[in-house]
Image: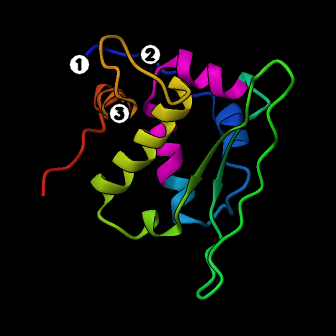
């Protein structure tokens, strides 16, 4: 795995998790992943006003609602990573993997990575490159 040099500016990374309460364990897991990803990826997220990370509010019987910005005339769209609350309660390696996988999708804009053309495989490969491989069960 290549060595990455994350920026990890706590104040800037805190802005990315402002949708989470300070005591929310999911916030801690998201920050753990954000601190581990390369500086260029952190910068991409921090510098993009259309990027956000939120926690889905699921309600039994009614599901959840997710509000996202509409695409702009230039074709750019929202880059919202919506995470399920249970990612704070599942086994830590799995939770961190899912968070990294979803952040990889956002960074890749659901596209390929290098020679990996399938978006799911690309997000898996990038998450593994960041140190969060898919756990074996």
CB under 8 Å between discs 2 and 1: no
Q: Secondary structure at mark 2?
A: loop
Q: Which residue is mark 2?
A: 5
Q: Nearer the viewer, residue 21 or 124?
A: 124
For label 2, the crowd category at 10 Å Cα-Cα, with few meaning under 14, some 14 to 19 and many 20 or more, is few
The label on residue 127 is 3
Q: Quadrant of the C terminus?
A: bottom left
| 1 vs 3, front mark | 3
The label on residue 82 is none
Q: Which residue is mark 1?
A: 1
For the record, the magenta segment spans 29-46
Q: Is residue 2 magenta?
A: no
CB under 8 Å between discs 1 and 3: no
The picture places residue 61, in percent across and down from the top left corner, at 61, 88
For label 3, the crowd category at 10 Å Cα-Cα, with few meaning under 14, some 14 to 19 and many 20 or more, is many
Q: Secondary structure at mark 1?
A: loop
Q: Is residue 23 left or right of residue 103?
A: right
Rounded to the nearest whole Å, what is the CA distance between mark 1 and mark 3? 11 Å
CB under 8 Å between discs 2 and 3: no
Q: Secondary structure at mark 3?
A: helix
Q: Quadrant of residue 42?
A: top right
The picture places residue 57, in percent across and down from the top left corner, at 65, 71
| 2 vs 1, front mark | 1
**Residue at left offset 70%, top offset 27%:** 46
7 to 123, vertically: above or below: above
The picture places residue 17, in percent across and down from the top left corner, at 66, 48
């Amino acid at each position: 795995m290549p060595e990455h040099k994350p920026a990890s500016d706590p104040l800037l990374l805190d802005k990315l998790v402002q949708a989470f309460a300070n005591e929310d364990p999911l916030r801690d897991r998201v920050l753990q992943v954000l601190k581990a990803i390369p500086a260029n990826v952190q910068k991409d997220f921090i510098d993009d006003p259309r990027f956000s990370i939120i926690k889905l509010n699921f309600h039994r019987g009614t599901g959840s609602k997710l509000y996202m910005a509409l695409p702009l005339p230039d074709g750019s769209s929202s880059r919202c990573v919506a995470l399920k609350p249970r990612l704070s309660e599942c086994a830590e390696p799995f939770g961190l993997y899912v968070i990294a996988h979803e952040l990889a999708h956002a960074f890749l804009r659901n596209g390929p990575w290098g020679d990996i053309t399938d978006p799911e495989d690309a997000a898996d490969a990038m998450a593994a490159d960041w140190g969060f491989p898919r756990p074996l069960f």
